[in-house]
Amino acid sequence: PTGHAELIIIGTGMAGIGLARALRRQGDKRSIILVSADSGEDYSKPLLSTGFAKRLSPNQLARHSATALADELDAHVLTHTSVEHVTTDTHTVQLSDGQTLAYDTLVLAIGAESRVPFDIPESVARYCFTINDLDDYRLLHHALSERPTRIAVIGAGLVGCEFANDLHAGGHQVTLIAPEATPLPKLLPEPLGFALSDAFQEAGIKLALHRTIKELAPNNDSTVRLTLSNDDIVNADVILLATGLTPRTALAKAAGLAVSPQGIQVDRYLRTSHPHIYALGDVACIEGINAMYVQPLQASAKALSATLTGSPTQVSFGAWPIIVKTPLLPVVAYPPSAILEHWRIEGEGGDMTALAEDKDGNLVGFALTGGCVRRKVELSRAAPALLG
Ligand code: FAD
């Protein structure tokens, strides 16, 4: 590429690629450079946590290579290249390969990174994995390709639960370890969480809930020993850390843009505190909301594409529930963003409905399991928008 592009997009996740596609679909012809710290392949991140059951190789998950993407988008795609610094005064970005590129408009679509809230001793680092992109999937896939494996999944949020289910379906022995009493603590009230626990246990997934990690140490036989807070021991061949994601705000912060722990702060036009720099996807926090799932980033890509092509468009999000890919017990949740007064819970066994209500009895969110997930459309219509 030349040292200048009218638009530089940092990040080739669904947000960065989605924006470039939306622009080209509108007939926009400006020069675009996409810069990616990873392999720059176009893949669907949600499919990562369905790949082990379906025995999908990493290459089957990659829809397009970076080269094919560059052709499709008529753009330059720089792979395995990080933006190390943004200088707003000169409208330039410094790359890890030493190049400097100038932009007219800059878009930060740099996502979120895996967070591990405790130290991993060097002696067990080679057993520990996180999965937040296709390159990570490649590494874990390789580690598991030889034989059925004992896997300790740490963290029972969406990513931990989906991988626990998927790795189990892929023939591995899974132990799910988390400090909370029930899985999906941010999405499900406890009775529904217990329904998911039951479904996991009945299928043969071992649960070690209400437990933290006291010690990680290597065994002599190329396995790792996890000592839990109650002194129980779990031996595993592999540890998958699903302990949360943090928006990558450091680059923006160093450039002097407004950030918060929830992400780079943007307005409804996805504009950061600097007029020529925008942000969208997992890294962006729009008026206090960073939803970190696909529908909001798709709506953001559409709105930003319109804004950049001369029709300033504010983004809005509907009441879009999160569909958790746990086939052992289907889960759909729209966690309350307004003040929750109480959960009204109905149903039995695995088929449960939980309605989150405010003090006036208005529906502010919901959670559904099993057969009750079919109520998602009806309840989404009744619930308040995520960003109205
Ligand atoms: P990312 O995909 O993280 O992309 C960030 C990009 O920025 C990457 O290309 C990275 O290399 C690049 N980058 C970062 N820093 C730099 C730098 N300094 N220089 C250059 N490049 C940089 N959502 C749903 O709606 N439904 C689901 O079923 C669902 N399932 C999921 C399952 C899993 C396992 C995970 C992890 C997430 C899931 N999500 C799901 C969430 C959804 O996938 C994410 O919200 C979405 O993919 C985020 O896209 P993004 O483009 O914002 O970020």
Image (tube, rainbow, N blue to C red):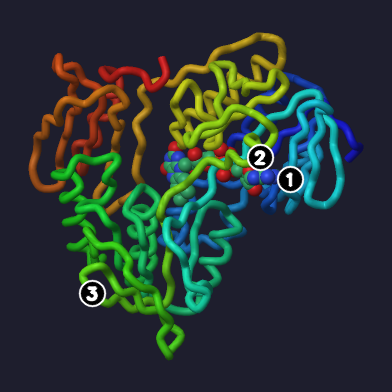
Distance of label 3 from label 1 (alpha carbons): 43 Å
Residue placed under numbered mark 1 in the picture: 84
Q: Say whether marks 3 and 1 touch (CB < 8 Å).
A: no
The location of residue 109, given as percent across then percent down, is: 63, 36
Image marks 1 and 2: residues in contact by CB distance under 8 Å: yes
Quadrant in which the C terminus appears: top left
Rendered position, 306 above or below 60? above
Mark 3 burial class by Cα count in 10 Å: few <14, some 14-19, many 20+ = few
Say which amino acid is labelled 3: Asp
Beta carbon at label 2 within 8 Å of ligand 1: yes
Front residue (pair 64, 129): 129
Position of residue 36 measured from the top left corner of the image (x, y, whole percent): 70, 46
Q: Farthest residue in the right direction?
A: 2
Q: Secondary structure at mark 2?
A: helix
Q: Earlier in the sequence, mark 1 or mark 2?
A: 1
Q: Residue at x 11, y 30 (%)?
A: 344
**How much space separates mark 1 and mark 2, taking CA atoms?**
7 Å
**Please, what is the three-letter code of the amino acid marked with disc 2?**
Leu
Which quarter of the frame holds ligand 1? top right
- Mark 1: which amino acid? Glu
Q: Say left or right for 98 vs 190.
A: right
Name the residue that disc number 2 marks.
251
| Cβ of mark 1 under 8 A from ligand 1 | yes
Q: Disc number at residue 231?
A: 3
Residue 243 visible within the image:
yes
Q: Is residue 371 above or below residue 235?
A: above
Name the residue located 20 percent from the left edge and 47 percent from the top edge: 193
Residue 206 pos. (x, y %): 24, 67
Q: Earlier in the sequence, mark 3 or mark 1?
A: 1
Residue 262 shown left or right of residue 35 in the figure: left
**Quadrant including the N terminus:** top right
Q: Residues within 10 Å of mark 1 (few under 14, many from 20)?
A: some
